[in-house]
Image (cartoon, helix red, strand yellow):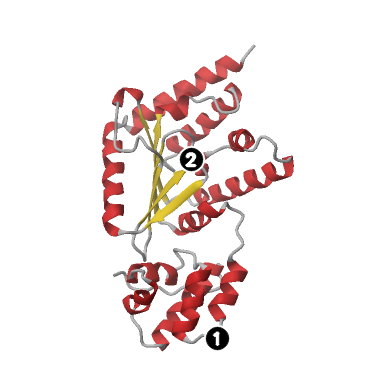
Amino acid sequence: MPGPKDLDPSSSPRAFLGAELRHARERAGLTQDELGRPLFVSGSFIGQLESGTRRMHLEYARQFDEILGTDGFFTRNCLAAAKSKYPDHFAEAAEAEAVATAIREYAPLLIPGLLQTEAYARAMFRAGHLTAPDELIDDLVAARLARAELLADATQPLLWVVLDEAVLRRKVGGAAVMAEALAHVASLGLRHRIIVQVLPFAAGAHMALEGSLKLMAFADAPPLAYLQGLGTGRLQDDPAAVLHYELTYDLIGASALSPQQSLALIESVAEDYAHEDQP
């Protein structure tokens, strides 16, 4: 199991709770496996909490207080840290994404959130919330764009994305929006900030036809997989399951166009949209 790293408790609520959990566990003389056993979770899961990779849920916080004799400390602080600007099904994944050293994602229908432009995100959220007030859409777009700030670092995280060809062909927001959105993706690839591939329709059937897949690796914790559906999402940390999803991603990448061919296709489709928008 990866060794612990020193956390800055002031860096985030997760880091604070993780550092305190490690301190309380070690003071109680328990290993990560021993602490996880009465909660029916693995030692790796406890390690992810301690490293700040995963969010501490209230049900676990209450049990930690009972097992470690911390007089409600984790319950109180877990409640205070529970608020998130992301939907409940995605909040934990977004927090893990922010501390990942590498992210690999297969996107079957939409440009991944980290790569979306403001206009693309706005069109997508409006289509999914037809009667929502503009203020709610503004908040959703702002949260989406804030996630993309992690790409401001020129080297980390490593971001490798495989886009299904359907992502390029689905006209979200109209031709002008698509031209800008695809040009943005191509620009990130040309600047070597991301690796991007396109899985063409000609590739036929593959192992991830049923949905999207995000894999996240960390410096001090086991990898995670995130599976998302309509209004739902699930983080998977079981080693055997994550290994299967890693194989799935590798096979998708092997069937996709090369990064050079993919960038050429993305640029070509972006130009087609740009010309379509002209009078």
Q: Which residue is mark 2?
A: 112
Q: Position of residue 178 (x, y in %)?
A: 55, 27
The residue sitting at 50% across, 74% down in the picture is: 61
Helix, strand or loop at label 2? It is loop
The residue sitting at 55% across, 86% down in the picture is: 71
> Does the residue at mark 1 contact the one at mark 2 (Cβ under 8 Å)?
no
The residue sitting at 32% across, 75% down in the picture is: 33
Front-lying residue, 193 or 171 = 171
Q: Is residue 144 visible?
A: yes
Q: Position of residue 213 (x, y in %)?
A: 39, 44
State how far apart marks 1 and 2 are (Cα): 42 Å
**Quarter assignment of residue 83:** bottom right
Q: Amino acid at mark 2?
A: Pro
Helix, strand or loop at label 1? It is loop
Q: Position of residue 57 (x, y in %)?
A: 50, 67
**Rendered image: mark on residue 71:** 1
Residue furthest top as drawn:
279
